[in-house]
């Protein structure tokens, strides 16, 4: 695991965007794994800017998002479909038909999950996966548990995730209690992984990434078995609250 410690959120966003831009410039038909949440928004802004300036062309890129709430319709403004359209897809030249987000309205979620993994495999696998990290160590919606699940699956959300994500909803009761998420193996199959974290609230979990320990209680520690992971974080996430 390589670590890049950035001065602040802006710098973290710039560094992560640089790696995505290099990836796409080196391999224009890259398969990108994408994440939602507040962490990658600044990076998406940089990608939009670079795309507008002609510094990167997304016209041959294919994307797969990590997760989606379940059940929730794609046009709900809290859905991850909506988030991605708002923060990236509609503002770049990524062909919409090459973007994929698990279907939060799938009548048969198990089948949807199985097909999602097949689609990733058929596309040739993810070249570069972007990840945020939950305060509890989740990646995607792989929550701390005794057992983690390899493939894309339907999962329940922990109270701490529901609490953390309630800031985007009118009230906590509105946060869906389930989600479809790529599994740990779906994520680990990616050729390269960037995990981003900012703010003192992520310090404890970023510190857990810096130890030799791997535990399903902190799912992100599973990334330590992968040979090409870069942690891009700001000073507060790495060192804790700065005075
Ligand atoms: P955040 O979420 O970027 O909103 O902090 C990260 C995550 O839950 O993966």
Image (tube, helix red, strand yellow):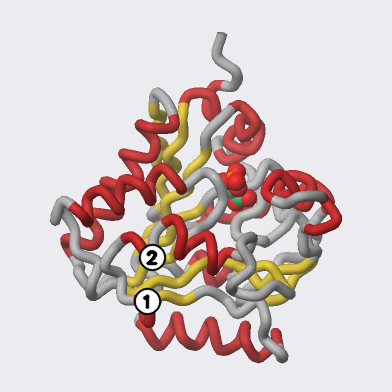
Let me know if residue 133 appears in the view. no
Q: Residues within 10 Å of mark 1 (few under 14, many from 20)?
A: some
Q: Hey, which quadrant is residue 164 in on the image? A: top right
For disc 2, does the CB lie below 8 Å from ligand 1? Answer: no
Q: Circle 1 — which element?
A: helix
Question: Who's the residue at 53% across and 56% down the image?
Answer: 36
Question: Who's the residue at 64% across and 68% down the image?
Answer: 76
CA gap, disc 1 to disc 2?
7 Å
- Whether 210 is drawn above or below 111: the answer is above
- Whether 8 is drawn above or below 19: the answer is above
Left or right: where 241 falls relative to 124: right
- In the image, residue 232 lies at what x, y percent? 42, 39
Q: Nearer the viewer, residue 205 or 34?
A: 34
Left or right: where 168 falls relative to 46: right
- Whether 234 is drawn above or below 45: the answer is above
- In the image, residue 118 lies at what x, y percent? 50, 87
Mark drawn on residue 209: none
Let me know if residue 83 appears in the view. yes
- In the image, residue 205 lies at what x, y percent? 64, 38
Do the numbered discs 1 and 2 sit on residues whose CB atoms are within 8 Å? yes
Left or right: where 128 falls relative to 223: left
- Whether 76 is drawn above or below 8: the answer is below
Q: Hey, which quadrant is residue 113 in on the image? A: bottom right
Q: Give the residue number, with chain letter if any, for mark 1.
A: 96
Question: Who's the residue at 66% across and 61% down the image?
Answer: 141
Q: Give the residue number, with chain letter if any, for mark 2.
A: 89
- In the image, residue 200 lies at what x, y percent? 61, 26
From the image, which quarter does the N terminus lie in? top left
Q: Nearer the viewer, residue 54 or 159?
A: 54
């Amino acid at each position: 695991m390589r670590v890049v410690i950035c001065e602040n959120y802006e710098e973290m966003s710039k560094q992560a965007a640089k790696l995505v831009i290099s990836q796409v410039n080196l391999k224009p038909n890259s398969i990108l794994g994408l994440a939602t949440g507040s962490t990658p928004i600044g990076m998406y802004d940089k990608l939009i800017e670079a795309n507008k300036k002609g510094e990167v062309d997304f016209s041959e890129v294919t994307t797969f998002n990590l997760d989606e709430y379940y059940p929730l319709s794609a046009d709900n403004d809290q859905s991850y479909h909506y988030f991605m359209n708002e923060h990236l897809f509609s503002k770049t030249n990524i062909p919409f038909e090459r973007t994929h987000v698990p279907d939060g309205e799938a009548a048969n979620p198990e089948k949807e999950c199985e097909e999602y993994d097949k689609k990733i495999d058929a596309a040739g696998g993810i070249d570069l996966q972007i990840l945020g990290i939950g305060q509890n160590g989740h990646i995607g919606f792989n929550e701390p548990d005794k057992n983690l699940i390899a493939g894309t699956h339907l999962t329940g959300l922990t109270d701490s995730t529901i609490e953390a994500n309630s800031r985007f909803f009118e009230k906590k009761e509105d946060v869906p209690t389930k989600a479809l998420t790529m599994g740990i193996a779906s994520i680990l199959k990616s050729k390269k992984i960037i995990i981003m974290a900012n703010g003192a609230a992520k310090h404890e979990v970023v510190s857990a990434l810096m130890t030799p320990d791997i535990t399903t209680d902190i799912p992100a520690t599973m990334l330590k078995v992968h040979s090409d992971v870069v942690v891009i974080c700001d000073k507060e996430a790495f060192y804790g609250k700065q005075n």
